Amino acid sequence: MTDKSLLPEKEVLRLEAMMEFERKYSEYDYICGIDEVGRGPLAGPVVAAAVILPKDSYYKYLNDSKKVTEKRRNKLYDEITTEAVSYGIGLVSPDIIDDINILQATYVAMKKAIDALSIRPQMILVDAVHIPDIGIPQVGIVKGDAKSISIAAASIVAKVYRDRLMTEYDALYPEYKFAKNKGYGTKEHMQALHEIGMSPIHRKSFVHI
């Protein structure tokens, strides 16, 4: 977390614009942002993160994980996971994705992330979707990872966690270059699939070769 007084005015204004929903629901002490990563890849789990930030948190350059460099994502991940009131990770394996479909698997991952929190949130801000059957008030925000600091924090945590996991898988299955492509269907990934077939972490329902 960065002392607000040390930030450029432009960055303060940007972050404060991203606090619109946190301030709208400021009567709640524990607002949780939730986001997922990994809905589109051909391999690996779908991962969700739930993050409860301290109120009025200023994390320099915090934004949608897709708009942040890898180096900055890693720095933000360390700051967020160290300083969050609580955070939780939920993941669903490729075989479960194949069994129940990616949308349902995403909901399961999000519920697991909520269950992993040490504090039960009073309000949930989630990127775009509505999580069924959680018994907690929630607001789905379209492109929420660019509009809410809580969702942006969750997007960073989920992205870095999954990227590191896929790098670990790369050591087990180096032919697919998972450290580089994170399971997405790049040209060299597809070439490996055609030449040697699927690994144990590929999603059978996603791969058509």
Image (cartoon, helix red, strand yellow):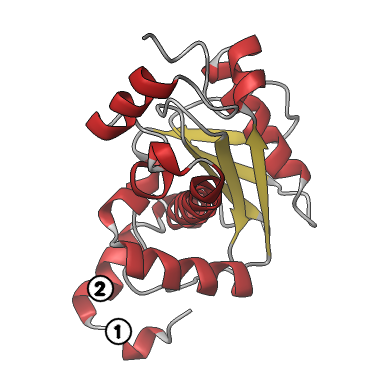
Q: Closest to the observer: 56 or 111?
A: 111
Q: Is residue 51 above or below residue 36?
A: below
Q: Is residue 95 above or below residue 24?
A: above
Tell me where residue 175 appears, x and y as whole percent: 41, 38
| Residue type marked 2 | Glu
Name the residue rendered at 55%, 25% in the picture. 130
Circle 2 sits on which residue?
A: 11
Name the residue rendered at 19%, 74% in the picture. 10
| Number of residues whose C-alpha sits closer than 10 Å to that of mark 1, classed few (under 14), some (14–19) or many (20 or more) | some
Tell me where residue 66 appears, x and y as whole percent: 30, 49
Name the residue rendered at 51%, 52% in the picture. 154
Tell me where residue 137 appears, x and y as whole percent: 66, 35
Element type at mark 2: helix
Point out the image quarter for the C terminus: top left
Q: Are marks 2 and 1 in contact (CB under 8 Å)?
A: yes
Q: Quadrant of residue 12?
A: bottom left
| Residue type marked 1 | Leu
Q: Tag on residue 7? A: 1
| Number of residues whose C-alpha sits closer than 10 Å to that of mark 2, classed few (under 14), some (14–19) or many (20 or more) | some
